[in-house]
Amino acid sequence: MPNIIAAIAPRRAKRPKTEDSCLVCVRAELVSLGGIIVFALCILFTALLIFMLTVPGATSSQLVIALVLVAASWMYFINSVTEKLSLVDHALFFSSALGRARSIPLGELEAMVLRHEGFNLERGMQTIELRQTGKKPDRISLGPCWQRNKLDSFLTSVDQALQQLEEI
């Protein structure tokens, strides 16, 4: 049996920073691991409903449960794919197709914390906690369709905007 003396991983050259490193508008995308998984579940639940409609032995309660699963999964998918964070006129905006839009002025922000929730810290669900002066913390729960590098770039641009606001 051979012995391993050393394992060396080649280092990647750092990419030069481009204009993508400072984003003022970022959207959730279907082309992400979470988006593909949610889309696959929607298709699976829809196929299950179609199968139950063609089988004569399905009861009405089973059909209602399948219909609720299909409707809820497609609504969740549409909501999570259409999420958008933007930075406009010294305010942070969050919107989605089925959720309420939120606007938080940057002047009121004390801190902004990005938390990864879930089993896999790299690809888990994410929550942004906004700590404001004189108010209780506000949380924005992001769906599974976000790409981590774009979120990091957006938070960097929010940090730069906060630094510019402090200088004024």
Image: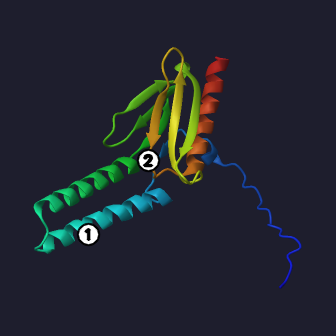
The image's mark for residue 47 is 1
Whole-number angstrom distance, CA of label 1 to CA of label 2: 23 Å
- Which of the 4 quarters of the picture holds residue 21? top right
The quarter of the rendered structure image containing the C terminus is: top right
Q: Dot 1: what SS?
A: helix
Question: Residue furthest toward the right?
Answer: 5
Residue drawn at (28%, 52%) of the image = 72
Residue linked to disc 2 = 143
User: Residue 72 vs residue 2: left or right?
Assistant: left
Is 7 left or right of 124, judged from the image as shown? right
Mark 2: which secondary structure? loop
Three-letter code for the amino acid on which mark 1 is drawn: Ala
Q: Is residue 148 left or right of residue 41?
A: right
| Quadrant showing the N terminus | bottom right
How would you rate the neighbour count of disc 1 (Cα within 10 Å): few for under 14, some for 14-19, many for 20 or more?
some
The residue sitting at 51% across, 14% down in the picture is: 134
Residue 32 seen from this side? no
Q: Which residue is pictured at 61% across the width and 26% down the height?
A: 162
Q: Nearer the viewer, residue 117 or 36?
A: 117
